[in-house]
Amino acid sequence: MTLLPDTLRRVLDGYLAEDEKLERELHDPSVAADHRRVRAIAQRRKAIEGPTQAWRTLRAKERERDDLRALIAAGGDRDLVVMAEEELRGAEADIASIAERVRRDLVTADDRAIDSVYLEVRMGVGGDEAALWAGELFEMYRRFAERRGWTWELLELKSGDAGGVTHAIANVVGDGVWSALGYEGGTHQVKRVPATETQGRVHTSTATVAVLPEPEEVDASLDPAEIKEIFTTAQGPGGQNVNKVTTAVHLIHLPTGIEVRMQETRSQTQNREKAWRLMRARVHERRQQEAAAKRSAERRSMIGSGDRAEKIRTYRWKENVAVDHRVEQSFHLQKLLVGELDELVAALESKDVAERLERIG
């Protein structure tokens, strides 16, 4: 019985060849001197480590199974045959288990290769309450990142008039960051009684989340001629100058109209570098969306479209639950807000992997 189709076996053989090629590159002095290339190789090898190791183990188990079958078919000493039959049952059970792990690791390998994302939260409908809600969501993700040991770099934060945030962006870096946060793109709706509500009426407010994988520079090349750069002094609330030196950076991608503003540090060089990184991610995302639209494919093969207009989750304060509409499950709301998203992420990933496996057969 073949538990993995030939198409998947060829893909796995390709991963083995790629892993061997990358290992040879690491021994090349010219590559070893390029720190970015070394990091990229290490990142890629780690991403395919699961399927390649499992594939090696599976092939060894299949050889063991074939040897046992040959021994049984040859007959001979009865006690030896009985022992071989018992070992064969164990080997076949191991093969089934390993094959399932190989399939799961295979469809998630590319996700694990992405260890840096831009997380962007914006207030939606609901006025001041929407800004407060956006701020709570942003803090929820910060706490989740802290629990996972990821690096959290605040790039932009605009406070609401009554607190919270109207718009916030962070760069999150760490192992498994895209696999976990990639499902969060969309509209997050909250139903609760605002602190300012005197009649006790439940209001509905929203915040939108976008999660953009940070592409490698080679995949996100930008023509400098297509970028308009504007340098100004940083502005604080109410338009008052918070920095008399020209440190703020405003980038405009002329072909698409995508804009990026950065003023978080007092260094124009640092703000410019951060602005260009974010611009690459946004342009890369736009290109990915356009390519997906042309071939009518699912956007990045994630659950749902990931579009900001899509309502993915409703947080119900009175019942203390958050209902994720893609997996149709409820989760403890207060646990989520303090960054305990592991159960939620596991449910989303499980559904996503099952759908991917169904597509590849």
Image (cartoon, rainbow, N blue to C red):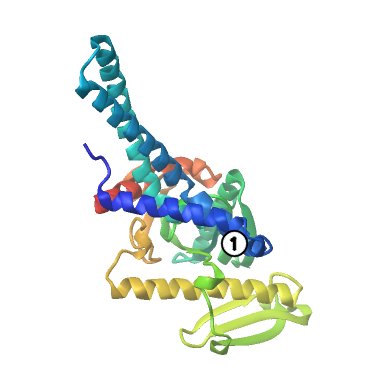
User: Quarter of the image holding residue 303?
Assistant: bottom left
The amino acid type found where label 1 is placed reads Asn
User: Quarter of the image holding residue 147?
Assistant: top right
User: Which quarter shows the N terminus?
Assistant: top left
User: Quarter of the image holding residue 59?
Assistant: top left
Q: Which sits in the foreground, 109 or 308?
A: 109
- Residue drawn 63% across the image and 63% down it: 31
Q: Can you see residue 289?
A: yes
Residue 346: x, y in percent?
A: 42, 42
Q: Which type of secondary structure does the marked residue at label 1 adopt? A: strand
- Residue drawn 59% across the image and 66% down it: 160
Callout 1: 10 Å neighbours few (<14), some, many (20+)? many
Q: Is residue 318 left or right of residue 143?
A: left
- Residue drawn 25% across the image and 13% down it: 82
Q: Which sits in the foreground, 35 or 145?
A: 35
352 above or below 164?
above
Q: Which residue is mark 1?
A: 171
Q: Quick one: which residue is furthest to the top in this view?
A: 79
Q: Which sits in the foreground, 90 or 310?
A: 90
Q: Is residue 263 left or right of residue 321?
A: right
Residue 92: x, y in percent?
A: 29, 29
